[in-house]
Image: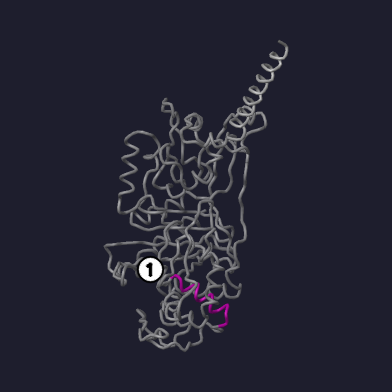
Amino acid sequence: MIRYIRRAAACCLVLLVALLVNAARVQVFQADALDANPANRRIALARYGQPRGDVLVDGDAVTGSKDTRQPLRYERTYTDGPLYAPVTGYSSQVYGTTLVEAAEDPVLSGTSPLLRPLWGGLTRRRRAGHAVTTIRAAVQRAAFQGLSGRRGAVAALDPVTGRILALVSSPSYDPGRLSGTGRAVRSAWDALNADPDQPMLNRAIRQTYPPGSAFKIVTAAAALDAGAVADVDAPTTTPDPYVLPGTSTRLPNEAEGCGKASLAYAVLVSCNTVMAHLGVKVGLPGMLEAVGRFGFNDTGLRIPSAVAKSNFDKKMGPDQLALSSIGQFDTTATPLQMAMVAAAVANGGELRRPYLVERTTTAHGTTVVSNGPRAYRQAMNPATAVRLQQLMVDVVEKGTGTNAAIPGTKVGGKTGTAQNGVGNRGHPYAWFISWAQGRDTGQPAVAVAVVVEDAEANRADISGGGDAAPIAKAVMEAALAG
């Protein structure tokens, strides 16, 4: 009898151990997988059971939360949604998160362990934190109003720190339309995705364009650093027209007097021939090294959201290199990348890593993670930067960029008109990159890149100096106003 009791007890012990092992497997080893399972509605109920933390601009929240009294209780709201959509992105109960809402989601949703003290972690209590951006409201609004709904983008940086002061994409959208779970949200999603103007595309950091003549600043820096040009005022050997190497194709100029023109004159009036020839003279290895110092071909740049790679082909013939050196062929850049080009010139050749989130905080404002100025690349020699600064100032004072001049302020700029479409049949894009230095200061205040798409404009009307420069001027004035 005792033998049977012992066997029954042993069997019960085995079952108990198996039960404990299974409980451990489920609660410890599979906990993360079960938490992440889309069928686990408890996670969604907890996520939306409290207000989401806010995204701040100039100390003011540009986001909020609305109590719907529904099972997924709190929906995201946005103040001036279209204005700040390229910064915040959206937080949708159906479609997830993007941009800052995605990059800082652990803090904004309250799931980051950095937000909870020990006892909060033990009780799994959530207290959402906030994301403080580097955006300045006045600069952002100036860029948004300058584009006036036209397709295009603006990026503005502090050249000294890398802080992003404005990030605008147009046309924009209201991310609040995607916040809930009803039929209206799905209809808004379908309408936004079907819109041919692509309002949800962040053109400032996710769209690349041929930079056209604005890229000539990069080629000029490469030529000066490589010693292909020693004196910016000395004549070059470039004929007009210039025949692309290995072909019978003649590269034209829209400006006059480009035959054997100096680098200074070529930048002033935007000579294609001189800059294309200089790119070939530097050579592909030299150009690749130079563009890399500005950030081209970097696939890992984040602000903290991912930035699309700006491209300069690594394999091409001399004729393609000539076109690439004037911002054509396969050369493409985001507006943020071209703002970085202007910032590097303005900051003496030193390029700072751009960043959009100044810090994240707890609900009570205590800093959790702080970001600050960080070195990115030495884009050019300091002496080269000094020369290019003067060339860009000349463009604004007496060249193609006079529409960006600000009385009493040192402003440098470069226009660009980039062809696009099959056989260059599409309407060109207008570019303007610039920087400004305030009165009685020894360092630049802002660097700006503007690109304008305009399907209705003639080529003569869409020049960088005509369409993009006035927008850049307004953005620089807003930044200088403090």
Query: How many residues crowd mark 1 within 10 Å: few (<14), some (14–19), many (20+)?
Result: many
Q: Residue at x 68, y 21 (%)?
A: 13
Instruction: Say whether residue 252 is left or right of residue 35.
Output: left
| Whether residue 263 can be seen here | no
Above-or-below relation of 253 to 445: below
- Magenta region, main secondary structure: helix
Image colouring: one colour
Q: Which residues are magenta?
A: 214-227
Q: Where residue 204 appears, x then y in whole percent?
A: 44, 57
Closer to us: 263 or 249: 249
Q: Amino acid at mark 1?
A: Gly
Q: Where residue 307 appears, x then y in whole percent?
A: 49, 56
Residue where numbered disc 1 is placed:
465
In magenta stretch: residue 7 = no
Above-or-below relation of 86 to 400: above
Closer to us: 197 or 432: 197
Q: Where residue 214 appears, x then y in whole percent?
A: 44, 70
Above-or-below relation of 26 to 468: above
Closer to us: 475 or 213: 213
Above-or-below relation of 370 to 160: above
Q: Residue at x 65, y 22 (%)?
A: 16
| Whether residue 83 can be seen here | yes
In magenta stretch: residue 216 = yes
Task: Tell me where residue 333 sits by quadrant.
Answer: bottom left
